[in-house]
Structure formats: C-alpha cells, structure tokens
Amino acid sequence: MSTATPVWVEIDAGAIAHNLDVVRGAVGDATRLCGVVKADAYGHGIPTVLPILTAASIDIIGITSNAEADEARRLGFSGRIIRLRAALRDEIEDGGPLDIEEWVGGGEHARVVTAAARALGRPIRVHVSLNSTGLSRDGMDWDDPQSQPHLRRIAASPELAVVGVSSHFPCEDADDVRVGALAFRDQAGAAERVMGAPRGRFEKHCATSYAALTVPESRMDMVRIGAALYGDTSAAVPELRPAMRLVSRIAAINPYPAGSTVGYDRAARLVRAGRLGVVPVGYADGYPRALGGRAEVLVHGTLAPVVDRLAMNSLVVDLTEVPSAGVGDEVVLYGRQGSAEIRSEDIERASGTIAAGAYTAWARLNPRVVVNVPAREAVAAR
C-alpha cells in the first residue's frame, strides 16, 4: 500500500476461499450453493470473490443491482445470476442482456416483471417469493385470498418461466428459523400444486448463512451464502475467518495533562495525564461517528480506546497504555492484528447498529488491497 494512503481496506482472499470450503463441508455437496456478491461482495470486491467462487465450481451467484451483474459478466462469469430483491421495471429491462433471474415480490410485482418481459420480447426466469417466515417484505402471504389466484396467473403467463420458490428469514434464531423453514417447505409444495407443476419441479430456497449453518432443515434445494463467505455470521462455526481489515496509521502523538478536554464539543475530559494519538480516519471515511468515545482500535496488538467524538477525517485514541506506539505505526480499526481482533460484534455493541452497515461502505470510500490470494484463484482470475 502506498505510504500516501491514510486509510485502506485489506481483503484476505485466502480467508474467503477457506470460508467457502468450511461452508461446503457443513452443508454437503448435495445442496446447491449460491454465492451472494451483492453490495460489491459485502465490500470485499466482486473481482476478488468471483474467481474464488469459480475455482470452487460455484455457478450461481446472488446480486441486487444490474451493475453487480454486469461486472460479473464482464469478468467472464457465465453461470446463473439471481437478483435477491424485487426490481423496478426499468431495472429489469436494462438488465435483460445480463440474463438475470428475477425475484417476484408478490402478485402485483409479477405484473411488473411480465411487462418487462414483454418489452424484452422473451420470457424471464423467476423465483416466486413467499412470506412463509413472517418477514412481510416482498413475499406473497399464503393466507391472503388473492395469493393462489396470483400464483395461477404467474404459472399461466408465457412471459414468466418459474424456476424457483423462495423466502427469507427475519431472525437469526434457531427455533424461529426451524419453524419458518417447515412452514416454507409446506407452502412451497402447495404453491407447486397451485401452479400445476410436478412435485419438486421448482428450486426451493430460503436459507442464508445463519440458517444453512445452524438449521439443516432450512437447506432444501439451494442455500444463499453471503455473510459466512466473508467470516461475518452469528452461526456458531468457529472455523470461519473474517476476511476484512480496516487499517490506518498513527499520524501524530502528543502528551496532555489531566483535565484536558478532547475533540469537538469537549466530549471527553482526561481524568489523568495521557498520551493521545491522531489517526487519519473519520466519518467521511465511513467510520461511524457513533463509535466516537465508545469503540477501541488495535495498536501493537493492544486495545486503545477512541476518545473523541470523531472529526470528518480524523479520530483520537488514548495510547497511554501502549507506550511503545510511535508515529507511523499500524492501527487496525476492524479485523485482526496479531492475536487480537476488533470483531463485528464489537462494532455493533459500540455503535448500536449492524456492522455490515459500516464495512460495506468502507470499500466504497477507501482504497482496497487484496492479500493472500490462493494460486487457484489467481489462475481463475486471468
């Protein structure tokens, strides 16, 4: 990394390959695996992740935007691409040349997809979403009296080629997932009958990382694996390794006497003399301002508290307990340094919000450096 760069995101490609092997070992070879690369592979970079998936013979990926699908096709991916949300009509039409399988988010949305298919002049392969799990976002509710008529119209439409029936879980709780998975299995089978399809004709899929790794009943025909690929899931799988670090360096260090106030609004006051360091990372770099005064960073493998309320492009850490720290030394704001680690749960506890909301932004705002690229993925990327 150039010494002119004050903050960067480091991606461990080897960790992603390792995590994929762990997931495959856990779910078995009989279940299809869809590698989820939405949000630029959760900030890890589609150009980094796609060769890893390809080298492992994963031929289904999940996206949400046309830009993600376009990048995958430009990188040479010829497999199936599934959009994992309901799309607008113009999105569907613009994405037509990319051969995206669309997520049908209800009966009214089916009409939108149908109109797009007519404009494209060909059928669109679709996955019909059911609200079996109680997410109540974009799936048809089985108790709605219009659900079965909607399903019959979808099945009768020459513009819609149904290839799957899908759902999504609202909670990462094993009991909740188990109940939802069983309800989905029953409703998906009933939906097949309503649509006049032979049993087992449609792909049934509802499991994302937590469900697939925690509740075997949720796996069905396919699992959609995103978070676990990147080592960030609440599933109890200790073999998974986080693949991202947010890294900077100490720009300046100064001693200050007890009683000194620190940062904007004098948000902190030193109760003892301290040695404070400036790190050139702020909320404009995607580091949430809510972490000010609550988070910790790693310096020389030791936790150092973030003292101030954060500025746009800098923050202040207390280095009093890290006397060996010097200007230019590495600071890890997320991820591992030696045997110590700032984990997603640490970010979430300090900020009060989901860590993915931060780390999916970091790579959009800061340079990304890929390390530890396995030989097989390097070959696949060429």
Image (cartoon, helix red, strand yellow):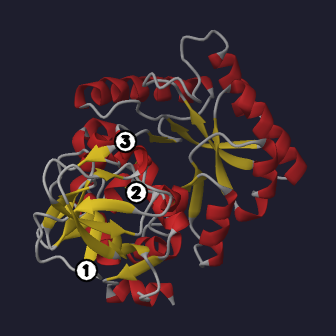
Give the residue drawn at x 32%, y 75%.
Answer: 252
Closer to the N terminus: mark 2 or mark 1? 2
| Labelled disc at residue 329 | 1
Q: Secondary structure at mark 3?
A: loop
Q: CA distance from mark 1 to mark 3?
A: 49 Å
Q: What amino acid does circle 2 point to?
A: Leu
Location of residue 200 in the rendering, given as x and y in whole percent from the top left corner: 47, 39
Are there few (<14), some (14-19), or many (20+) residues within 10 Å of tag 1? few
- Nearest to viewer (mark 2 / mark 1): 1
- Nearest to viewer (mark 3 / mark 2): 2
Tell me: 94 left or right of 322.
right
Q: Which residue is mark 3?
A: 220
Image position of 177 with respect to 118: above or below? above
Task: Locate the N terminus and report the quarter of the image it occupies.
Answer: bottom left
Give the residue drawn at x 64%, y 51%.
Answer: 101
Dots 2 and 1: beta carbons under 8 Å? no
Q: Secondary structure at mark 2?
A: strand
| Labelled disc at residue 33 | 2
Closer to the N terminus: mark 3 or mark 2? 2
Location of residue 322 in the rendering, given as x and y in whole percent from the top left corner: 12, 69
Are there few (<14), some (14-19), or many (20+) residues within 10 Å of tag 2? many
Q: What amino acid does circle 3 point to?
A: Met
Count every numbered label the image shows and give the total.
Answer: 3
Q: Secondary structure at mark 1?
A: loop
